[in-house]
Amino acid sequence: MLNPFKVRSEELSKRVTIQQPVKITNDRGVNLRGYPAYREIKNVCASIESYGAYVKDGTAEKVSELEFRITIRYREGITIHDRIIYQGRTFEQILPARDVNEKHQFLLLTCREKVK
């Protein structure tokens, strides 16, 4: 039998901001392309765990993207288009949010941070 993913409330020690994209339209009502604007919807406690990196050209110095698992308390309405901000860093979701153990207690967000 598989062990369920366990999360404890005291592990959620970081304060992050969840942002949702805002559609920008011109005076004719046409959605504009390009980088969307974002609005803050909530500040929540989270756990952030690094688990992967993409290496470019075979050298560790050229890492361009890092992957993270971010765990937050369960919230309705989190979509794959939302992003997480933590201490000036931006984490974009790469998979839909997952309800940990299907108990509506915690959400697991799989995110990617682009490194310049």
Image (tube, grey):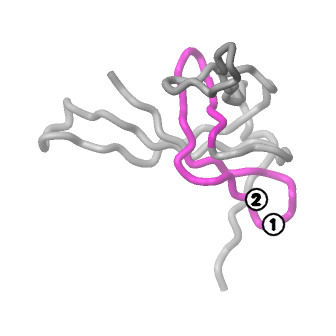
How many C-alpha atoms fall within 10 Å of the one at disc 2: few (<14), some, or many (≥20)? some
Which quadrant is the N terminus positioned in? bottom right
- Give the residue type that dot 1 points to: Glu
**Position of residue 96 in the picture relative to residue 49 (left or right):** right
> Which disc, if any, is residue 26?
none
Q: Which mark is residue 102?
A: 1
Occupied quadrant, residue 65: top left
Q: Does residue 86 lie above or below 93 as drawn? A: above
Q: Does the segment drawn in magenta span residue 90?
A: yes
The relative height of residue 88 versus residue 106 in the rendered view (above or below) is above
Q: Nearer the viewer, residue 63 or 24?
A: 24
Instruction: Locate residue 24, reporting x and y percent.
Output: 65, 21
Kindly identify the residue that appears in the image at 68 percent across and 63 percent down: 5
Q: Please name the residue that numbered disc 2 is placed on.
A: 99
Image quarter where the C terminus lies is top left
In the depicted view, which residue is nearer to us: 47 or 62? 62
Q: Local crowd at mark 1 within 10 Å, few (<14), some, or many (≥20)?
A: few
Magenta residues, start to end = 81-110
Whole-percent x and y of residue 100? Answer: 74, 60
The amino acid pointed to by label 2 is Asp
| Residue drawn at point x = 63 percent, y = 30 percent | 84
Residue 107: percent from the left, percent from the top? 74, 50
Contact? badges 2 and 1 (CB < 8 Å): yes
